Amino acid sequence: MPLDPAFLQYPMRRHGMDHDRYDWSMLVDRPAVRWPEGKTLALWINVSLQHFPMNPAGQPVKLPGSMTMPYPDLRHYTLRDYGNRVGVWRLLDALDRYRCRPTFAVNAVLADRYPYLTAALRERGHEILGHSWSMDTPHAGGLAADAERELVRRSLDRLEQAFGHGPRGWLSPGKLESAQTPDLLQAAGIRYFCDWVNDELPYRFHTAGGDLWAIPLSTEIEDRFVVMDNQHSEASWARQVMDAADFLLAESIRQGGRILSLSLHPWVMGQPHRIKHVEAVLDYLGSLPGVWQAEAGEILDAFVAQASP
Amino acid sequence: MKEDTGYYDYWPYRDRPRITWPNGARLAFWVAPNIEFYELDPPRNPQRTPWPHPYPAVPGYSIRDYGNRVGHARQMTLLDKYGIRGSISLSTALITHHPEIIAQCRERDWEFFTHGIYNTRYTYGMSEAQERDMIAESMDAIEQAVGRRPAGYLAPALSHSETTIDLFAELGGIYTCDLFHDDQPTPVRVRNGRRFVSIPYSLELNDTIVYVVNKIEPRRYGQIIKDAFDRLYAEGANSGTVMCLPTHNYQVSCPHRMKAFEEALEYITGHADVWITTGREIAEYYLAHHHDAAMADINLKLSGS
């Protein structure tokens, strides 16, 4: 029996994308971007602070880093929790030593569970991104719109209460989304989100209520992806980041500003055998004269100030 | 189902008729950028699911879009630098979606071969007529866009039927990239009896297999490429070999992987006896100069002598 004839029909074959969320454009064809202080490579360091429940529902999907053993999975629960107890403080020391200003994507439940940690971040004045409620609240196809709207609201409200202001930015756990996630984020007052890894500069993302800005946070160079999924050594991760910085810096001098987005997880890189590789990376990036280290919101603001209306 | 593809006979690598390449080259080197379009919401094939996540599969879709938005220009710049014309494995719907990319490749006289219409439309389950129509439509699209009918085929997402290569030969194709049984071109037995060849394309050196399946570090990929080249270049002194780098702009063109790739290209193109060419040129040269001697030798070896 042949395939359904619909399998050989191509209704979305048209110029540009096969959806209406954003416009097609090649990075190389866009006007050159300039970063402050004459720098050409913006360095955005994202630290994701996460809670992985020991009893995940795993619906509609299980997120990377979630429990894998039969309940109670003490090993994975505590190894993830290590990041919030130990790893994050070690990472903060390293970031301070190299005068870096990271941006934190925070599961809102951390404000309930670890008020000491969220208060410390508030005191330090870091930019906070919404990161849903926990690592067991995936925004994925199959999640009902009403439930997701409530999840977005609850997460943003809790962060606003803990930090004194609501986040401008959002990172979905696992960078997953449902079909309505961008619309719900825009309606909830979010200005930019980081889930779509299809670019290296911000771009306009269309939603039902108006545009969001998309600022892609690279997965391919993320600590968890390289070290845990690909099982490359910490030293190899560091080498890859340095190679990326060298490449982007050279390209940015020729073509205009670029962004190196580094995503770190305290439960991965906060381990004692890994932290020195983070320090080596920060030391190297800090030594490059063309690098502008900034928060995600600052990078977006600098970009938007130059963007055509 | 068959135990064997039926496309070729056993033919040992040793004591074959000597292959020579133009200008005394030992090795024919080609780079095959896969320029693909994956759909966000393709119709569901009964035998293979395109995405690991429910709609919308943002992680998988968006990194592939990165290949076209960001990666393509990067790899093209690098191939320009080392004097390499790409042989594009093309999802032909991309001609409509992203004609800007097609125009850049045409300016450089790159080869276009067909890789189906979308990389999210699998061959599995198609009737022979449906598969013939799909392949023909993709060939027509390339011919209309670039003025030349494609010579080669790599089935979309490496999804095949038992007669995929037969159908492509019947539609006028001369070479396939879908067989991984050899380091030299080899004759392929197709249903219409036409002279048709397999050109080595390589899964082992394919960046997506390397990075996504085998999870290899970028600098090790660079070393693997150099090691493969060294051996094939040495063996090519006796009889010409082929080396292909199949690439994907969403893998090899990521910033942390470009340096290793560039070093490998610099290394290969720094050797004197390398024929930097395209899949079509290798196929045409082989058909004109070596195919018939190969057939005679295959038939001789089959008899056990």
Image (spheres, helix red, strand yellow):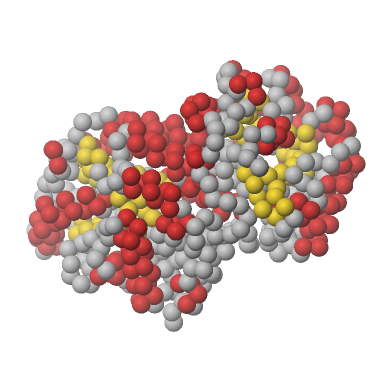
In the foreground, B265 or A61 = B265
Q: Residue at x 34, y 32 (%)?
A: B81
Label count reads 0
Residue B226 position, x and y percent, is 33, 34
Q: Identify the image quadrant of the N terminus of chain A.
A: bottom left
In the rendered image, is residue A243 in sight?
no
Please indicate, yes or no, whether residue A92 appears anywhere in the rendered image: yes
Quarter of the view holding residue A230: top right
Q: Is residue B252 above or below residue A288?
A: below
Where's residue A281, x and y in %?
60, 25
Direction from residue A113 to residue A106 in the image, left or right: left
User: Position of A41 compared to B31: left or right?
Assistant: right
Q: Nearer the viewer, residue A159 or A119?
A: A159
Q: Quadrant of the C terminus of chain A?
A: top right
The picture places residue B255, in percent across and down from the top left corner, at: 51, 35
- Residue at figure coordinates x 51%, y 72% from the top left: B46
Q: Residue at x 44, y 44 (%)?
A: B72
Where is residue B221 shown, x and y percent of the image?
42, 38
Vertical placement of residue A276 versus B212, above or below: above
Residue at 51% from the left image edge and 26% from the top image edge: A253
| Residue found farthest to the bottom | A1
Q: Residue furthest front?
A: A309
Q: Is residue B197 left or right of residue B139?
A: left
Front-most of residues B263 and A56: B263
